[in-house]
Image: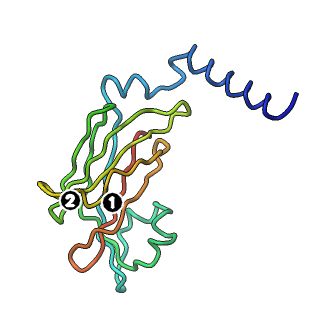
């Protein structure tokens, strides 16, 4: 059997497992009913020397480029949200803009496909729609919004 055939068979087996066992994806029913729980953390980061909030030290992504150039990080807000497929949720940001997070679907491997954008009420999107595929409990970050002499780093964690 060649490699292409093996891959096709493996993909078919995976697809059949998910089709025949709806409980294989524990979050699937949650997306339709109670929803997927999520957290949004808004951090003010500055390059000047200072302190890093202890709660951020466990987020390894913040200690790698491009975030490791910031020597001061403070948490401005933590929000909880519940996402349902096709129903966007908004979080107010300290700079007057809004973060919009929308669950598009749950992938066959259990990861979440989400669309996010940052906009100002009544204006064009500052950050146009961006699609992210994230594993449950694994945060992803959006940065670049200027605020109070620093940069806002927005972390989103779904499920987990």
* Display coloring: rainbow
Q: Where 119 falls versus 67 (above or below)?
A: above
As drawn, is 14 to the left or to the right of 157? right
As drawn, is 97 to the left or to the right of 27? left
Which numbered tag is attached to residue 93? 2
Residue 5 picture location, percent across and down: 79, 28
Distance from disc 1 to disc 2, alpha carbons, whole Å, reads 9 Å
Q: Which residue is mark 1?
A: 154
Q: Where 160 falls versus 119 (above or below)?
A: above
Residue found at the far front of this picture: 124
Q: Which residue lies at the image location 13% right of the left edge and 55% below the top edge?
A: 121
Q: Where 128 falls versus 50 (above or below)?
A: above
Asked if the residue under mark 2 is in contact with the one under mark 1, i.e. CB atoms within 8 Å, the reply is yes
Q: Which residue lies at the image location 34% right of the left edge and 86% below the top edge?
A: 48
Q: Quadrant of residue 62?
A: bottom left
- Quadrant in the picture for the N terminus: top right
Q: Which residue lies at the image location 50% right of the left edge and 62% below the top edge?
A: 60
Residue found at the far bottom of this picture: 49
- Quadrant in the picture for the C terminus: top left
Is residue 19 or residue 73 the one in the foreground?
19
Q: Which residue lies at the image location 24% right of the left edge and 59% below the top edge?
A: 77
Residue found at the far right of this picture: 1
As drawn, is 103 to the left or to the right of 94? right
Residue 56 picture location, percent across and down: 40, 64
Q: Determine the secondary structure under disc 1.
A: strand
Residue 106 picture location, percent across and down: 45, 32
Which numbered tag is attached to residue 10? none
């Amino acid at each position: 059997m060649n490699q292409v055939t093996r891959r096709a068979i493996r993909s078919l087996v995976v697809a059949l497992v998910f089709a025949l066992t709806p409980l294989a994806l524990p979050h699937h029913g949650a997306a339709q009913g109670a929803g997927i729980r999520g957290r949004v953390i808004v951090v003010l980061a500055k390059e000047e020397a200072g302190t890093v909030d202890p709660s951020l030290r466990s987020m390894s992504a913040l200690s790698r480029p491009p975030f490791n150039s910031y020597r001061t990080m403070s948490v401005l807000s933590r929000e909880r949200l519940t996402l349902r497929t096709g129903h966007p949720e908004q979080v107010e940001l300290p700079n007057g803009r809004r973060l919009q997070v929308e669950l598009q679907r749950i992938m066959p491997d259990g990861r979440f496909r989400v669309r996010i954008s940052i906009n100002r009420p009544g204006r064009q999107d500052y950050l146009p729609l961006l699609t992210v595929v994230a594993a449950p409990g694994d945060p992803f970050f959006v940065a670049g919004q200027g605020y109070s002499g620093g940069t806002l780093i927005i972390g989103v964690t779904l499920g987990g």
